């Protein structure tokens, strides 16, 4: 192999690694975005036609979902495995009457892909209208680790949420007409 061939091979390998890292980061971003959409109330229209088990499928078999920090550790606890995680989440989703409206917005993203793993950090802004009409704006720090499947799909391996702030916004009137 000539020096030029060796260098071209090195560059191609380097570029392939960079593309793989970008694709892994994008898969992680899509997985977390879908998770947040499925946790919104009301859920987006495409969630109504989603296959059964879509929320569970976003997690690895050994996934951990946990609240961290004094408030969320006590309030949310730690859940291991997709069935336990989704059982916990369903307590907040329809038909449970916890929320009238709930939307999740992510910002301040930082992602690092290494091998078959992506680690990310976000700030979550959550605007909630509870069943009783109380409204809040919550800020939380998310730390999420993803496993990247051989087909390029990202699955949540470890999800941590820590409350940073909460602002009560008052009481919302009844539901608007649909």
Image (cartoon, grey):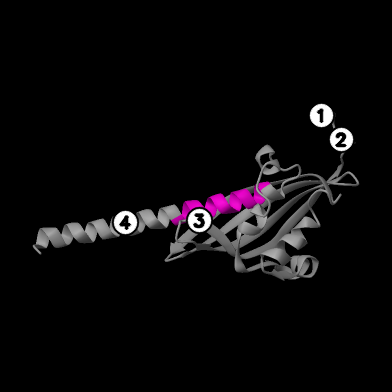
- Judge by depth and name the residue closer to the eye, 16 or 135: 16
Whether residue 34 appears in magenta in the rendering, the answer is yes
The residue labelled by disc 3 is 153
The residue labelled by disc 4 is 16
- Judge by depth and name the residue closer to the eye, 114 or 44: 44
Sequence-first tag of 4 and 1: 4
Q: Nearer the viewer, mark 4 or mark 3?
A: 3
Percent position of residue 133, x then y: 89, 44
Task: Give how far apart the Cα atoms at labels 4 and 1 are.
Answer: 49 Å
Question: For the point 20% across and 59% down, which residue is it?
Answer: 9
Range of magenta residues: 24-37
Task: Give how far apart the Cα atoms at labels 3 and 1 are.
Answer: 36 Å
The residue labelled by disc 1 is 178
Question: Is 104 placed left or right of 91 in the picture?
Answer: left
Question: Is 85 placed left or right of 154 in the picture?
Answer: right
Percent position of residue 75, x then y: 80, 66
Sequence-first tag of 4 and 2: 4
The residue labelled by disc 2 is 175
């Amino acid at each position: 192999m000539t020096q030029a061939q060796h260098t071209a091979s090195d560059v191609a390998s380097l570029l392939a690694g960079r593309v793989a890292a970008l694709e892994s980061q994008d898969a992680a971003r899509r997985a977390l975005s879908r998770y947040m959409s499925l946790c919104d109330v009301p859920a987006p229209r495409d969630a109504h036609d989603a296959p059964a088990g879509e929320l569970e499928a976003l997690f690895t078999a050994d996934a951990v979902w946990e609240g961290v920090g004094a408030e969320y550790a006590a309030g949310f606890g730690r859940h291991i495995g997709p069935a336990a995680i989704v059982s916990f989440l369903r307590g907040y989703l329809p038909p449970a009457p916890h929320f009238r409206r709930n939307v999740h917005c992510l910002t301040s993203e930082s992602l690092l892909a290494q091998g078959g793993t992506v680690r990310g950090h976000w700030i979550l802004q959550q605007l909630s209208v509870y069943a009783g009409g109380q409204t809040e704006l919550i800020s939380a720090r998310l730390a999420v680790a993803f496993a990247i499947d051989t087909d390029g799909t990202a699955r949540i391996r470890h999800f941590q949420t820590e409350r940073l702030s909460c602002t009560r916004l008052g009481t919302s009137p009844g539901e608007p007409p649909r």
